[in-house]
Image (cartoon, coloured by chain):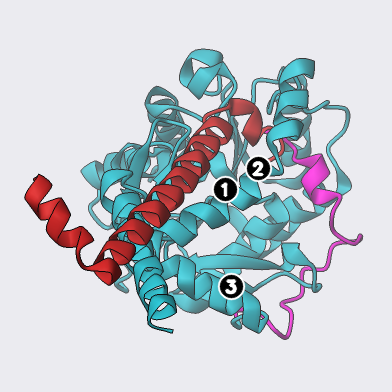
Amino acid sequence: MKKILIIILAVITSLIAAEVIARYVMRYPAQASRKTVAIIPGSGVKSRIFLYKPYSKYLNIEAGYKQFTYNNVGVHGPDVDLSEDSKLIFLAGSSFIEAYQVPSEKTAAAVFDRKLKAVDPGYSVFNLGASGCDPYEAYFRTKLYTQMYRKPDKVILALEQFRTKWLEQYDTPLDFDIPEHFGKEYRLSKAKRVASTICEKSSLASMLYRFAKKVKRLDEIERARETEDGPENEEIQVIPDALKATMRQFQKDYGNDFMLVFFGQDLQATEMLREFCDSEGIRFYSSDSVAVPENRFDEHGHLNEAGNLKLGELFYESFVDAYQE
Amino acid sequence: MNRLLTRIKSKPYLWLYLKVTFVFTMLLSAIAAKALLTIVAVESNPFFYANF
């Protein structure tokens, strides 16, 4: 009996030792504290998003092994001035806008924010970009943050692709009514709640959980490498109806305060979008010199610091052109 | 060092505790290292972001 107790004590000690090694030697942070919130009509995985606790830490590997910190509203980017006097700009988009790969002060949102503040310190850019966020989700994100904080003065949707595959996951025609469960915390199963709490407290558990999720994708990535099916290889044929409907809804809700910025390299896609926006009266700006290989990690990945700088400048120039008084 | 080892070994429960702690710490650290290497290998590959 005494031996068993000693072994249990030894195992607990080794767990603590391994946790110390993971946190301080391997410098792996525990999972950032978050809650799951339902925002999109429907009940699938795509109906909910994560909201992170302000100033929590996270790890990004695409740009090297780097630890970053969320801002005062729990997103990656410059701190947001939420006072009534500020001129709030929602910047929505995918992981290219979120820009997890570069320090928050080097994101396109931060570059844009600094340039605007140099002209008028009242401006504040709120980075709503998120991994896997398609334009339809981006619409509901703007609604969620409006409910949580306040209505934006301007809304910019930035796209680098049409995101046809992502938009195909939703039932059509798209439903833009605010769902009943909107903004409410999604009730996870008890097992998931326990797992999440442990991962928020322990670096070791967080690392093992992430590993379990990643190991399944190894084969998939190798196949993609062999076929060179890079992230930018979406076949552009027509603007998906879901994207058209989403842009119309943005325009309907925000009017002239809404602007679409396209920074993909496909000139055909740019022209299609320009034509559509002109016919719908949507402000449209584009550049094909942002997402060029030298502005991306390993030529195929997300935007590097130079790419974010270029994108931030594109936002600023577009904004000044659209709203200069 | 030898004297210290002899003294520890003379206390069988302490010796057992240290041995088990060492073995489990090494085991967990090896698993953590393997996990971290896999995470780095997967996420530093730009094709990981192909559909994301």
**N-terminal label among 2 and 3:** 3
Where is residue B26 shown, x and y percent of the image? 39, 48
Name the chain under label 3. A
Say which quarter of the image contains residue B46: top right
Q: Are marks 2 and 1 on the same chain?
A: yes
Tell me the kind of residue under disc 3. Thr
How far, Cα to Cα, is label 1 from label 3? 21 Å
Identify the magenta region: A160-183
**Residue A262 against residue A181 in the figure, above or below:** above
Magenta span dominant secondary structure: loop
Same subunit under labels 2 and 3?
A: yes
**Above or below, comparing residue A45 to residue A309 in the picture:** below
Q: Nearer the viewer, residue A216 or A322?
A: A216
* Front residue of A239 and A67: A67
Q: Is residue A77 magenta?
A: no
Query: Dots 2 and 1: beta carbons under 8 Å?
Result: yes
Residue at image mark 2: A215
The residue indicated by pointer 3 is: A36
Kindly indicate whether the residues beneath marks 1 and 3 are on one polypeptide chain: yes
Q: Is residue A70 visible?
A: no
Q: Residue at x 41, y 35 (%)?
A: A312
Find numbered disc 3 in the image and state the secondary structure of the residue it sits on. Answer: strand
What amino acid is at disc 2?
A: Val
Judging from the image, what secondary structure is the residue with disc 1 in? helix
Task: Calculate the distance from the C-alpha at mark 2 to the C-alpha at mark 3.
Answer: 24 Å
Q: Which residue is mark 1?
A: A211
Chain drawn in cyan: A
Q: Chain B colour?
A: red
Q: Nearer the viewer, mark 1 or mark 3?
A: 1
In-image side of A167 versus A194 (left or right): right
